[in-house]
């Protein structure tokens, strides 16, 4: 399956402007944008300034030292608001994970969501994707979100657009997961199933909530092998995640879906495409950095978030963490 984001791939280490280069020659000043690009790529900022010559080693920590005070344009925002602002700048308006509404629509391309049907998004986030899908297909798309603050923000945005009934966003608890029986034509979720400790119960609830011939579409972070959990890359990544993660392997998913009775339509490893989306998102974000429009707090939140994604990418590069896309169907009962 081709990656949904077919935009031009951004260059992480973009050429430095002539003005910045001249300024750097006259002092030790290196623009924040370039410092972040160098840190993200793991190369020396001065080397990057000299037209991206390769450096053998990069900074030893996530700290970005600032030579000059940064303006406080973002100072009135809470850390949570800053984080949401950064995530939307990286992944797109209304989005907190890679891919956005284009990728969500691509994943649902094989699902017959007709006008008036009801679907469930288990990874609603700020609601950008479920609102777009609801409007495009004239369907009701209920959104559930684990993070209470994000759910409240998503619900407020739906209300602002008068879509609180057609594309609502609500908070839910993974450890108390119960769905209405025989309600949905489709249940889908992006990068959220690995946060459920009891995935057997989760998938069982989804099975019961689907109508006959209903669809389950999801993407998830999975272990590369059964031994991946004990690797240093996974341990480092797991500690960095803000919510406890309990991934399965591909075989775990195959076995559980089969036991429940699902018919598997697609079962694809899309790790390479996912890594491209992550790289492109952060590269494009780096291009928006401006020393005069952000403050120290913004930089701190930005670096903490970027570190999480770096640990995730390192675990994927080592082969211990993979990105899986699944499309399954609850078949109609055999009435013979």
Image (cartoon, rainbow, N blue to C red):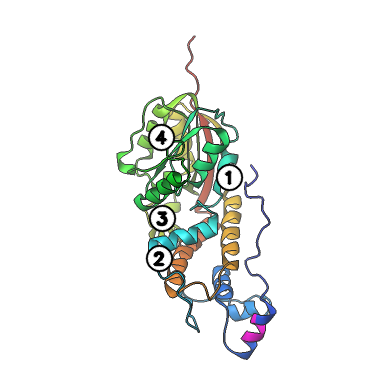
User: Where does residue 195 sit, x and y in percent of width and height?
Assistant: 39, 47
Q: Give the mark toward the camera: 1 or 4.
A: 1
Pointer 2 residue:
77
Is label 3 in a helix, a strand or a loop?
helix
Q: Residue at x 45, y 47 (%)?
A: 160
What residue is disc 1 on? Answer: 103
Q: Residues within 10 Å of mark 2 (few under 14, many from 20)?
A: few
The one of 134 and 193 positioned closer to us in this rendering: 134
Q: Residue furthest left?
A: 176
The answer for how far apart the CA atoms under marks 4 and 3 are is 25 Å
Give coordinates of residue 23: x percent, y percent.
63, 85
Range of magenta residues: 20-24
Up/down of 334 relative to 62, above or below:
above
Between label 1 and label 3, give the one nearer the viewer: 1
Say if 133 sits above or below 323 in the image.
above
Front position among marks 4 and 2: 2
Query: Disc 1 versus disc 3: distance between alpha carbons?
Result: 32 Å
- Where does label 4 land, which residue? 203
Residue 21: in magenta span: yes
Residue 17 x %, y %: 67, 77
Q: Secondary structure at mark 2?
A: loop
Magenta segment, principal secondary structure? helix
Q: Is residue 114 left or right of residue 232?
A: right
């Amino acid at each position: 399956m081709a990656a949904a984001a077919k935009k031009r791939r951004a260059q992480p280490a973009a050429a430095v402007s002539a003005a910045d280069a001249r300024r750097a020659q006259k002092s030790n000043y290196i623009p924040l944008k370039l410092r972040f690009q160098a840190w993200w790529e793991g190369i020396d900022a001065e080397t990057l300034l000299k037209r991206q010559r390769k450096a053998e080693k990069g900074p030893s920590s996530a700290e970005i030292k600032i030579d000059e005070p940064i303006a406080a344009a973002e100072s009135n925002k809470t850390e949570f608001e800053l984080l949401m602002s950064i995530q939307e700048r990286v992944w797109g308006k209304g989005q907190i994970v890679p891919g956005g509404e284009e990728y969500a629509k691509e994943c649902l391309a094989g699902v017959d969501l007709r006008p008036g049907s009801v679907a469930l998004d288990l990874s609603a986030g700020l609601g950008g994707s479920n609102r777009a899908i609801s409007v495009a297909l004239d369907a009701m798309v209920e959104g559930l979100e684990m993070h209470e603050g994000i759910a409240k923000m998503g619900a407020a945005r739906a209300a602002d657009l008068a879509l609180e009934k057609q594309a609502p966003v609500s908070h839910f608890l993974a450890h108390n997961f119960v769905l209405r029986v025989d309600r949905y034509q489709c249940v889908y979720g992006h990068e959220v199933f690995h946060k459920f400790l009891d995935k057997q119960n989760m998938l069982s609830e989804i099975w019961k909530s689907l109508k006959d011939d209903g669809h389950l579409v999801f993407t998830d972070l999975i272990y590369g092998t059964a031994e991946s959990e004990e690797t240093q890359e996974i341990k480092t990544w797991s500690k960095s995640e803000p919510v406890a993660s309990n991934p399965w392997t591909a075989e775990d998913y195959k076995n559980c879906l089969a036991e429940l009775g699902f018919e598997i339509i697609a079962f694809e490893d899309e790790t390479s495409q996912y890594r491209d989306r992550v790289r492109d998102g952060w590269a494009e974000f780096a291009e928006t950095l401006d020393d005069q429009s952000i403050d120290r707090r913004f930089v701190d939140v930005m670096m903490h978030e970027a570190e999480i994604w770096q640990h995730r990418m390192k675990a994927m590069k080592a082969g211990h963490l993979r990105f899986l896309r699944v499309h399954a169907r609850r078949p109609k009962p055999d009435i013979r």
